Image (spheres, rainbow, N blue to C red):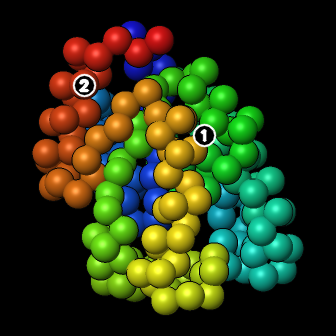
């Protein structure tokens, strides 16, 4: 079992990667880093500002750099941006350097959470559609990448405590190659 290095959380916007990541890091007595927050800190701009000024491709480049920076030390829980899995090199880096956990949440629940989160207004729309339509479309496009990236898939619609308990049990019992 190689979870003594790093745990990467992947999943859609609103799947709970940051909340679960912070709680999991606390449980393990590890450090926590959110690649979106790290990226904004490194660039000195918000995601919306980066995308508006430089476009999605530049943002994805910065996202890959943030992933590398986040993974420099071990004993870290790393919450990744929803699109981190779009680049094969990111998926490979995560799988090779730790355990990747996919927080799977149904699109209706994602839309409910995103609609209730005032911070989500700061994120640029990926499709320009209604929230539920966008969530469904983006999840459909990325679902296979999330599944292929993950060593472990967890039901992210549970409470944070249930998710953490589930992850801890899986880390102890499931062999991850």
Q: Is residue 113 visible from the viewing direction of this image? A: no
Identify whether 93 is placed above or below 5: below
Choose between 101 and 70: the one closer to the eye. Answer: 101
| Mark-to-mark CA distance, 1 and 2 | 24 Å
103 vs 120: above or below: above
- Percent x, y of residue 100: 47, 33
Which quadrant, please, contains the N terminus? top left
Residue 80, how many percent across, how many down?
Answer: 53, 49
Indicate which label's residue lies in the foreground, 1 or 2: 2
Q: Position of residue 97 (x, y in %)?
A: 58, 22
Residue found at x 65% / y 42%: 67
From the image, tell me which residue sits under label 1: 70
Residue found at x 65% / y 64%: 40
State if disc 2 and disc 1 touch (CB < 8 Å): no
Q: Is residue 73 above or below residue 85?
A: above
Q: Is residue 65 visible?
A: yes
x and y percent of residue 12 in the render? 46, 59
Considering the numbered disc 1 on the image, is that residue within a helix, a strand or a loop? helix
Q: Is residue 156 left or right of residue 7?
A: left
- Residue at coordinates 72% horizontally, 38% vertically from top-left? 88
Q: Within 10 Å of the Cα at label 2, are there few (<14), some (14-19), or many (20+) other Cα atoms?
A: some
Report the number of discs: 2
The residue drawn where x is 29% and y is 22% is 171
> Badge 1, how many Cα within 10 Å: few under 14, some, many 20+?
many
SS label for mark 2: helix
> Mark 2 highlights which residue?
170
Q: Which mark is residue 149?
A: none
Among numbered discs 1 and 2, the one appearing first in the sequence:
1
- The answer to whether residue 27 is left or right of residue 147 is left
């Amino acid at each position: 079992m190689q979870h003594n290095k790093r745990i990467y959380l992947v999943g859609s916007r609103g799947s709970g990667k940051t909340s679960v990541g912070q709680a999991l890091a606390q449980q393990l007595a590890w450090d926590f880093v959110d690649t979106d927050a790290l990226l904004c800190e490194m660039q000195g701009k918000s995601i919306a500002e980066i995308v508006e000024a430089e476009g999605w491709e530049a943002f994805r480049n910065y996202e890959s750099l943030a992933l590398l920076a986040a993974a420099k030390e071990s004993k870290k829980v790393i919450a990744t941006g929803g699109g981190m899995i779009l680049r094969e090199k990111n998926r490979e880096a995560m799988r090779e350097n730790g355990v990747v956990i996919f927080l799977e949440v149904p699109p209706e629940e994602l839309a409910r959470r995103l609609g209730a989160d005032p911070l989500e207004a700061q994120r640029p729309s990926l499709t320009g559609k209604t929230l539920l339509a966008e969530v469904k479309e983006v999840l459909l496009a990325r679902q296979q990448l999330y599944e292929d990236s993950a060593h472990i898939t967890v039901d992210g619609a549970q409470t944070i405590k249930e998710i953490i308990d589930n992850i801890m049990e899986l880390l102890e019992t499931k062999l991850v190659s």
